[in-house]
Image (spheres, rainbow, N blue to C red):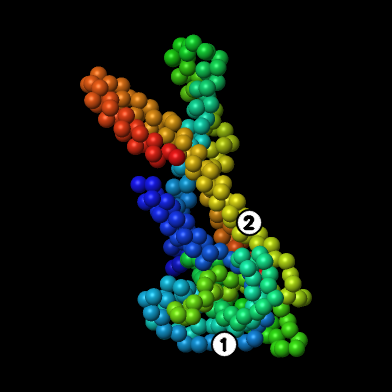
Amino acid sequence: MRKIKIIFLILLFLIVGGLLHYALPQHDIVRVTSTEVIRTDFTWINRRFYAQADSGGAELVTRDLRLINTEKKLTFLFGFVPRDSTKVMVYRNEDTGWIWPPYFKFDSSDLQAESAAEISVSGTEQWAVMTHYGWRNKYLSIYPNAIGIRSVDGPDVRIIPWFNIFFFVFLVVAFLFLRAVWRQFRERTIDPAMQDMGDSLGSVGDAVAEKRGRFRRWIDTWRS
Amino acid sequence: MGLVRLVFFGFIGLSVIYFLISIYSRSVRREKLEDRWGQDNPDGGDPTAREAFIDEGMARYNTGIRPKLILLVYVIPTILVVAIHILTTYY
């Protein structure tokens, strides 16, 4: 039972963590090398890693996809520890529209133009901060989706992830609130009902009381 | 179409949160009133008077500012959506 619980918790942590890692904004320090448009055919496997056609357009089985080719500074630990090396990174640039993930992005064409304006040639490097979400996977041909780009003076900028800070604070507050709600509900509604049930059953005999004790113990396992 | 879906499901989701907070807040207030009565009347007091005391307190709660503040559950996410949309699309 304990083992199942631990495995379940690890799985839950991995799924929720993966979802957050996919959907929350991240910042890369990049040097845009080119922008391009490729035609894309999706499969049922990689379709879920793409948003939809441009807002206002029709959703067809095949469509063009804007890409931004860059060279990005590598980091450790989700961007908190900078490194000296660089690596190519390709971002897609799609409208997320009104639905998931909730970036409400409609300006893909503008972003493509801004990225093109950031194109930097070797020798006179021009660095920019690319905000994005999503994953790059070569086997599935999926790309992180670019959300915004802004130019910076050099590659050594300190980026403070304000949104993520607020988001995790909110997550903790929401968790504490839900726990308080659940405790209040248990204290005011479930426990008195249990008490009533126990009182009425008490006259039936010890056997039932023993059963109830077991039931209570089972309920108690949910408390920890 | 996407906007309609967002508003529809967003409204349902926020309504669930709204009722959750309302019930919780009311329950906490009732418990506080019960505790206060218990402090003033350690022997339990008259049950009818106790009920009247709690009912009066709850009536005061219902006309107070707190239940109206819970409506912010609808307002804040709307502001957030508009803010995120403006920040991503125009900046």
- A44 over B74 or under it: above or below: below
Horizontal and vertical percent position of residue A128? 69, 76
The residue that appears at 25% across and 19% down in the rendered structure is A203
Marks 1 and 2 close (CB-CB < 8 Å): no
Horizontal and vertical percent position of residue A104? 54, 67
The residue that appears at 77% across and 75% down in the rendered structure is A153
Q: Is residue A2 left or right of residue B35?
A: left
Residue at numbered disc 2: A165
Is any part of residue A210 visible from this angle? yes
Horizontal and vertical percent position of residue B57? 53, 25
Residue type indicated by callout 2: Ile
Which quarter of the figure is the C terminus of chain A placed in? top left
Label 1 vs label 2: CA separation?
Answer: 33 Å
The residue that appears at 51% across and 32% down in the rendered structure is B28
Residue A124: assigned label:
none
Chain of the residue where label 1 is placed in the rendered structure: A
The residue that appears at 31% across and 32% down in the rendered structure is A214
Viewer-side residue, B37 vs A32: A32
Residue type indicated by callout 1: Glu
Viewer-side residue, B63 vs A183: A183
Is any part of residue A60 visible from this angle? no
Chain of the residue where label 2 is placed in the rendered structure: A
Residue at numbered disc 1: A36
User: Helix, strand, or loop for circle 1?
Assistant: strand
